Amino acid sequence: EAQVTQNPRYLITVTGKKLTVTCSQNMNHEYMSWYRQDPGLGLRQIYYSMNVEVTDKGDVPEGYKVSRKEKRNFPLILESPSPNQTSLYFCASSTILPGERGYNEQFFGPGTRLTVL
Amino acid sequence: TQLLEQSPQFLSIQEGENLTVYCNSSSVFSSLQWYRQEPGEGPVLLVTVVTGGEVKKLKRLTFQFGDARKDSSLHITAAQPGDTGLYLCAGEAAGTALIFGKGTTLSVSS
């Protein structure tokens, strides 16, 4: 089954304790991205990756890191989480790169609800 | 900065009613997508519209792309409780990442 998986689905942590949210897709998609979803603000892109070893900042990258060592995996790293990073996080992948002609359908993971105390 | 404005933000209706959700922008998009998100899940693509003036139907859902490709609407006929969820529009412009609206939360009660 074609899917994007995220782990963990729920996480409660404390300020300053480093954490990693994993994301994996089995569709051989080149483009992967991370979003956070907050009430009243909608989906905002944190980071994205066009291909292995190619990553770039989205709209709200502060406080986050990513890596793309393998095509299928795109982990999101919070080196020193703070309460304002409490949010619902989604990983997404797509076969079409931004700017290319085509339907840039995003396949989303199930989400990770993060609470930073 | 490209923005997509969705309205209304919240909609609470009775089963059987019709409704329309709007997605507006001052920017031109090469395509526009509609997603639906249910609680505890990620958004799932419903439809993509590409041509100005295009109308697509998905059962009781009708999607329209404006002639100038700056706006879109989603019309639901005879809404059912199963239509409850968050509806998101997303615009694709050349050379940019997908831009999402803030969403419309629809609640359909029986």
Image (cartoon, coloured by chain):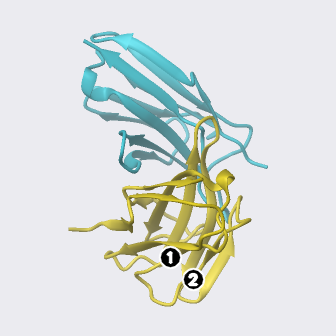
Q: Is residue A37 above or below residue A103?
A: above
Q: Is residue A112 above or below residue A101?
A: above
Give the Cα distance between marks 1 and 2: 6 Å
Give the labeled residue for mark 1.
A75
Q: Characterize the local packing of mark 2: few (<14), some (14-19) or many (20 or more) Cα atoms within 10 angstroms.
A: some
Could you tell me residue B73's position as x and y percent? 51, 29
Q: Residue at x 45, y 89 (%)?
A: A70
The answer for which chain carries disc 2 is A
Q: Nearer the viewer, residue B61 or A5?
A: A5
Q: Earlier in the sequence, mark 1 or mark 2?
A: 2
Q: Colour of chain B?
A: cyan
Q: Residue at x 52, y 41 (%)?
A: B89
Local secondary structure at mark 2: loop
| Image marks 1 and 2: residues in contact by CB distance under 8 Å | yes
The amino acid type, in three-letter code, at marker 1 is Pro
Write down the quadrant of residue B19 in the picture. Answer: top left
Q: Colour of chain A?
A: yellow
Q: Characterize the local packing of mark 1: few (<14), some (14-19) or many (20 or more) Cα atoms within 10 angstroms.
A: many
The amino acid type, in three-letter code, at marker 2 is Ser
Q: Quadrant of the N terminus of chain A?
A: bottom left
Disc marking residue A67: 2
Q: Is residue A11 above or below residue A72?
A: above
Disc marking residue B47: none
The answer for which chain carries disc 1 is A
Q: Nearer the viewer, residue A18 or A43?
A: A18
